[in-house]
Amino acid sequence: MYLHGTSKINDKNHLEIGGVDTVELGMKYGTPLYVYDVALIRERARGFRDTFKRLNINAQVAYASKAFSTVAMIQLVEEEGLSLDVVSGGELFTAIQAGFPSERIHFHGNNKSYEELDMAIKNKIGCIVVDNFYEISLLEQVCIENDTTVPILLRVTPGIEAHTHDYILTGQEDSKFGFGLENGQADAAVEQVLHSKYLNLLGIHSHIGSQIFETTGFVVAAGKMFAKMKDWKEQFGFIPTVLNLGGGFGIRYTNEDSPLPVQSYVEEIIAEVKKQADELGIGIPEIWIEPGRSLVGDAGTTIYSVGSRKEVPNIRQYLAIDGGMTDNIRPALYQAKYEAVLANRVSDPVEETVSIAGKCCESGDMLIWDLPLPKANSNDMLAVFCTGAYGYSMSNNYNRIPRPAVVFVENGDEQLVVQRESYEDLVRLDIPLKSKVID
Ligand code: LLP
């Protein structure tokens, strides 16, 4: 059994996180319940930040809030001195509600609306990551209306796709994001914005994928970006002051995953950027990165209650829990794998292999196949590890199941940071048929 962060087994044989008994949390707040190990989030944040500091590199570590965005989470990111990546008006609004310093917010997205850009400009955010030609003119219009200028990065597509151990050079740069680096789009975009009175080009951005276990993809991407920077220096006299290499640093979900410590990714990226900058004869640009999963993924654990059991004789035992694809869609969407234990009987001996089913009306709603467990029954609670990234943020109300609550734990202290949705919440936006309304 692999226990992450501050997780341990207490003297009641219960799973404890941040010094708090998760079984008691489950009883107090109900299940399913997302529990976040705040100390582990802080440790990961410092791992990224301190590596840049130690190597004396100007940097911004921007938390990719799409992984898990709530007011309390954004406030924690602020406490740790990170920057913030948002990708929608909703994520930006959450950051503003959290009181996050707007100059440290970066705005991404391949189809930002006029209203979203206007909101970003009015809030004077630090940087807009411009994705396409349409956005260049839209953003200029917004700047004209607001009589202001805005710092931007251009997102480029370096023709690399990286997933776990594989990275693929996709020659044709077939992606919905960014300006193609090889097909001339990036050059045209650089030239266009350098002539803009409103857009202040800080540098370029690339993001090559997610759940990446090796540094090769980042190194190759940096190399390709520097090759272009050489051309732009010669053609336009443009030298970027910022190079953003995106996120994607992998985490350990199961023992099939072997991520590098966060420091290693940062060290390798810095080494490559230094080498390339030297060769180009320019100063080292500010390096920005955007970790999402690697900051919050293994800090999150979901506590469920065990319910029904179905035996398919000689084939399989299905054990159903009180959540599923509504609070964690990743197994159904990506065949993602997770490890789990019984939260109230953590070190009891393994007695059987079960498959954990969600409660949604869909056969594909399976959380874990073939999980070794003690013989579980309906008084037990199941703790599924590593659900901190893209769990709550991708949760949904399929079957009109209310979204779970979220609790932060740290040093024996607990705090509810998102309430459980109620049935009233589910119908709050519904409007009855006109004919049924009696005034
Ligand atoms: N920066 C950009 C521009 C991104 O598109 C992403 C993720 C990140 C940073 C953060 O990547 P991370 O460090 O979290 O890997 N829903 C999927 C993951 C989608 C990632 C989308 N972009 C999942 O559950 O695995």
Image (cartoon, rainbow, N blue to C red):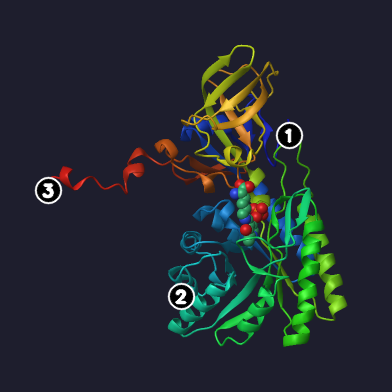
Q: Nearer the viewer, residue 161 or 149?
A: 161
Classed neighbour count for the residue bearing mark 2: other residues with Cα under 10 Å, few (<14), some (14–19), many (≥20): few
Give above or below for 374 relative to 358: above
The kind of residue on which mark 2 rests is: Lys
Q: CA distance from mark 3 to mark 2?
A: 41 Å
Q: Position of residue 163 (x, y in %)?
A: 73, 50
Residue identified by numbered label 1: 2
Q: CA distance from mark 3 to mark 1?
A: 60 Å
Question: Are the residues tagged 3 and 1 within 8 Å (C-beta)?
Answer: no
Residue identified by numbered label 3: 439
Q: Position of residue 197 (x, y in %)?
A: 56, 88
Q: Nearer the viewer, residue 221 or 186?
A: 186
- Please give the name of the residue rendered at 81% of the width and 62% of the height, measured from the top-left corner: 219
Disc number for residue 122: 2
- Please give the name of the residue rendered at 70% of the width and 74% of the height, measured from the top-left corner: 242
Q: Quadrant of residue 316?
A: top right
- Please give the name of the residue rendered at 51% of the width and 81% of the height, measured from the top-left corner: 140
Question: Are the residues tagged 3 and 2 within 8 Å (C-beta)?
Answer: no
Q: CA distance from mark 1 to mark 2?
A: 46 Å
The kind of residue on which mark 1 rests is: Tyr
- Please give the name of the residue rendered at 64% of the width and 12% of the height, measured from the top-left corner: 314
Classed neighbour count for the residue bearing mark 1: other residues with Cα under 10 Å, few (<14), some (14–19), many (≥20): some
Left or right for 419, reference 411: left
